[in-house]
Image (cartoon, rainbow, N blue to C red):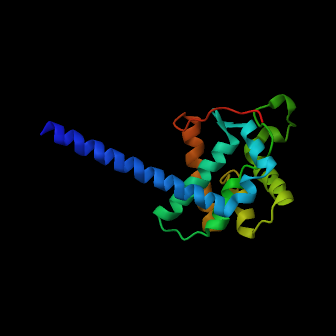
């Protein structure tokens, strides 16, 4: 009897792991489908060089935010445009500098939380064709620091996913692997 319980538990665990693997594959496919040009760009790949929170790189952070945004959208049946959701999430922290390096940052950039959405938006607009929804996501993802709240559901979802991921990274529950030289 005890052995049959162990066998059932192992089988359930195996099935759960298989479901998680399949979910990750679907999420990765959506990221590639809607953000291949971003994922393959040199500047985006360089976000692996900078730490965001704890030891999580900016690259890992925005990938997590994109995945959690898709999961929130599906779980709560919010009905977001997936193309805008993915692209906005991938570009929301596209500021392209190390915000921890106080010695090399201007006084304005030292208030990173307030200024980086505008910097990220300017950088993203230089490289990519953005929709109004994508601009809204990037510009307002730091609400309430951005003062004006988001007005579209995609921006609310990314803002929520960003807050969750930032908290998990800061307290060490989502662990990164540190910055990588390219």
Residue lying farthest to the left in this orientation: 1
- In the image, residue 61 above or below residue 35: above
Residue lying farthest to the top in this orientation: 103
* Rendered residue at 67%/63% (across/down): 34
- In the image, residue 131 above or below residue 52: below
- In the image, residue 2 above or below residue 162: above
Q: From where the camera sits, is residue 162 visible?
A: no
Q: Quadrant of the C terminus?
A: top right
Left or right: 114 in relation to 103? left
Q: From where the camera sits, is residue 171 visible?
A: yes
- In the image, residue 28 above or below residue 129: above
Residue 130: x and y in percent read: 77, 65
* Rendered residue at 55%/53% (across/down): 68
The image quadrant of residue 143 is bottom right
Left or right: 156 in relation to 46? left
Residue 49: x and y in percent read: 75, 36
Residue 84: x and y in percent read: 67, 66
Judging depth in this view, the residue of 69 and 147 nearest the camera is: 69
Judging depth in this view, the residue of 51 and 28 nearest the camera is: 28
Residue 118: x and y in percent read: 80, 54
Q: Quadrant of the N terminus?
A: top left
Left or right: 85 in relation to 24? right
The image quadrant of residue 132 is bottom right
* Rendered residue at 33%/45% (across/down): 13
């Amino acid at each position: 009897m005890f052995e049959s319980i162990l066998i059932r538990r192992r089988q359930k665990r195996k099935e759960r792991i298989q479901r998680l693997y399949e979910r990750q594959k679907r999420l990765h496919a959506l990221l590639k489908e809607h953000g291949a040009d971003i994922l393959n760009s040199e500047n985006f790949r360089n976000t692996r060089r900078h730490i965001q929170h704890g030891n999580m790189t900016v690259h890992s952070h925005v990938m997590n935010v994109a995945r959690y945004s898709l999961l929130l959208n599906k779980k709560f049946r919010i009905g977001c445009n997936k193309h805008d959701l993915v692209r906005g999430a991938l570009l929301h922290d596209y500021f392209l500098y190390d915000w921890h390096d106080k010695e090399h940052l201007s006084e304005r950039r030292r208030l990173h939380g307030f200024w980086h959405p505008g910097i990220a938006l300017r950088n993203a607009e230089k490289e990519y064709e953005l929709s109004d929804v994508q601009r809204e996501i990037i510009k307002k993802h730091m609400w309430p620091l951005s003062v004006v709240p988001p007005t579209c559901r995609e921006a609310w979802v990314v803002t929520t996913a960003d807050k969750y991921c930032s908290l998990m990274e800061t307290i060490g529950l989502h662990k990164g692997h540190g910055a990588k030289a390219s």
